[in-house]
Image (cartoon, rainbow, N blue to C red):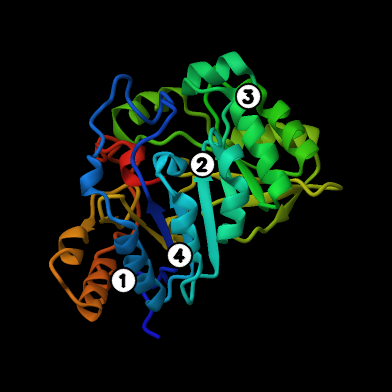
């Protein structure tokens, strides 16, 4: 089997697949207030096109696929697509990132479709603060989490973007919540993605500070966790709780990067923090055969940059996160 190896020797085995750029939340650090410039649905890749692209990636050694958005459960019939992707030879790990607002309705069907694990964005356990951050309903998220747990989705990872003066005082509460529910907890630093993300960097908290605070309360030991993502993990000794730290600003993890992102329009983004890309949709719709498409994908990986430049060039990425695909 041919494999995708970039110019820096990193094996690409992980595809983050956006199925929509739309979201039913409006997190202030992600989507600008009043933003309506979403891509029209007729530009989205169809399920057949998505399945074909994922199959080609799997034939090039990609074994992990994460369904993202926007909010992926906004896309109609998502469990059907999940089932089609999960059935592809070579796909060993199918996961989902979600805000959980619609998860109660879909958790069982996602589990049956082959989704094994989920990441849920949850920045606050205070309903009013949660609404200020997301314009969403915390009760629906908690309900979705509990239904997902009963459905057997495992592990369930809680992603908390830590923001100074907004939710950094809730770190202990979030640890307790994850301990009580057997969830994994991951803290994330704010990133300068688009104007909204750049404004949110004023709220930046380096996760070394968070870790020191946790060490005052708990005995932490180094841990590992499957999934292929960028987090470094510790375990709270004497418990099953694993806590991850995702540090794109303070300690970038680019040397371990094993992933690329595909937007709902078929744009292959080679780095979250760079502008390098390849447009696959025109190729898919031009009648290009599989071998030629795979050659184009391999050529794109040959252009994958070594690292992001969030610190050096925070103004470089103008697209917002929901347009990139999680």
Q: Residue at x 31, y 41 (%)?
A: 323
Residue 7 badge: 1
Q: Position of residue 101 (x, y in %)?
A: 54, 32
- Residue furthest to the right in view is 238
Whether residue 311 is visible to the viewer of this picture, yes or no, is: no
Residue 139 badge: 3
- Classify 10 Å Cα crowding around label 1: few (below 14), some (14-19), many (20 and above): few
Residue 98 badge: 2
Q: Position of residue 154 (x, y in %)?
A: 68, 53
Is 254 or 43 nearer to us in this picture?
43
CB-based contact (under 8 Å), mark 1 and mark 2: no
- Classify 10 Å Cα crowding around label 3: few (below 14), some (14-19), many (20 and above): few
Q: Position of residue 301 (x, y in %)?
A: 29, 68
- Label 3: which secondary element: helix
Which quadrant of the view contains residue 304? bottom left
Is 56 or 76 nearer to us in this picture?
76
Q: Quadrant of the N terminus?
A: bottom left
Which quadrant of the view contains residue 14? bottom left
Whether residue 137 is visible to the viewer of this picture, yes or no, is: yes
């Amino acid at each position: 089997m041919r494999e995708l190896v970039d110019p820096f020797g990193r094996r690409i085995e992980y595809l983050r697949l956006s199925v929509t750029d739309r979201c039913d939340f409006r997190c202030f650090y992600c989507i600008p207030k009043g933003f309506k410039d979403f891509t029209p649905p007729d530009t989205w890749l169809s399920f057949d096109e998505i399945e074909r692209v994922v199959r080609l990636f799997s034939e090039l050694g990609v074994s992990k696929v994460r369904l993202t958005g926007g909010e992926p459960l906004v896309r109609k019939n998502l469990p059907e697509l999940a089932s089609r992707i999960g059935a592809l030879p070579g796909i060993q790990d199918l996961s989902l990132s979600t805000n959980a607002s619609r998860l109660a309705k879909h958790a069982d069907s996602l589990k049956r479709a082959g989704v094994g694990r989920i990441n849920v964005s949850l920045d606050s356990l205070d309903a009013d603060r949660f609404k200020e951050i997301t314009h969403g309903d915390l009760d629906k998220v908690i309900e979705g989490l509990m239904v997902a747990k009963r459905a057997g989705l495992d592990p369930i990872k809680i992603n908390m973007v830590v923001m100074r003066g907004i939710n950094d005082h809730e770190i202990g509460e979030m640890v307790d919540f994850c301990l009580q529910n057997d969830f994994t907890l991951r803290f994330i630093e704010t990133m300068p993605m688009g104007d909204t993300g750049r404004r949110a960097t004023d709220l930046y908290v380096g996760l070394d500070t968070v870790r020191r605070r946790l060490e005052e309360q708990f005995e932490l030991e180094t841990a590992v966790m499957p999934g292929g993502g960028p987090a470094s993990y510790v375990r709270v000794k004497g418990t099953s709780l694993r806590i991850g730290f995702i540090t794109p600003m303070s300690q970038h993890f680019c040397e371990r990067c094993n992933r690329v992102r595909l937007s709902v329009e078929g744009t292959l983004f080679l780095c979250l923090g760079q502008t390098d890309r390849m447009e696959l949709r025109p190729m898919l719709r031009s009648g290009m055969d599989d071998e030629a498409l795979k050659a184009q994908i391999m050529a794109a990986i040959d252009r994958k940059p070594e690292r992001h430049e969030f610190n050096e060039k925070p103004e470089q990425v103008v697209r917002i996160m929901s347009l990139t695909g999680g």
